[in-house]
Amino acid sequence: MAENVTGPFQKIEHVGIAVRDLEEAVARYEQTLGTACYKRETVESEGVETAFFRTGESKIELLASTRDDSPVARFLEKRGEGVHHLAFEVDDIHKEMERCRKLGYTLLSESPKPGADNKLVVFLHPKEHHGVLIELCELIE
């Protein structure tokens, strides 16, 4: 049996899914998951509206663009709807940013930004993670 070893990432906090029509996607996920969306929020700085669902210990975040120049709008134009990012919970986002810099990873911002669901967030470039955008998030207390 494999040993349970955890590193600096506490858990998968959520999976972000880019959608074109948030209303349709919320209705579909509510039907599929058999539970209601528990929170909706607009993050003006990122140009997105979000909707969250709980699934066990993790969450699903639906993301819809609120403007044509947002990162999610560019993602949808280039790749279409689908998994946008994996978010990992961390205890100390500044410490993890420094660790990632030392590993040579490209951070998409110099400092963490306020994100949805009461989190500080920073993203790691997908080119270094096999095409997957990685989000580090720390709960703002």
Image (tube, rainbow, N blue to C red):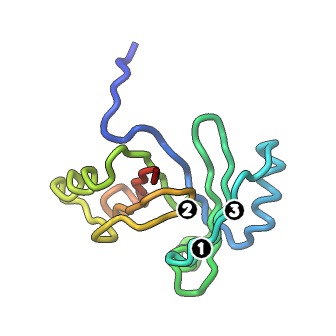
Toward the viewer: 86 or 59?
59
Toward the viewer: 19 or 91?
91
Q: Residue 40, which numbered label?
A: 3
Q: Residue at x 66, y 40 (%)?
A: 55
Q: Residue at x 60, y 59 (%)?
A: 17
Residue 16, given in percent of the width and then of the height, sits at 56, 57
Cβ atoms under marks 2 and 1 closer than 8 Å: yes
- Give left or right: position of 45 versus 60: left
User: On the image, numbered disc 2 is attached to which residue?
Assistant: 116
- How many circles with numbers are drawn on the protein? 3
Other residues around mark 1 within 10 Å, as few (<14) / some (14–19) / many (≥20): many
Residue 34, given in percent of the width and then of the height, sits at 82, 42
Q: Secondary structure at mark 1?
A: strand
What amino acid type should be assigned to the residue bearing mark 1? Val
Other residues around mark 3 within 10 Å, as few (<14) / some (14–19) / many (≥20): some
Residue 3, given in percent of the width and then of the height, sits at 35, 18
Gap in angstroms between the C-alphas marked 3 and 2:
9 Å
- Along the polypeptide, which appears first: circle 3 or circle 1? 3
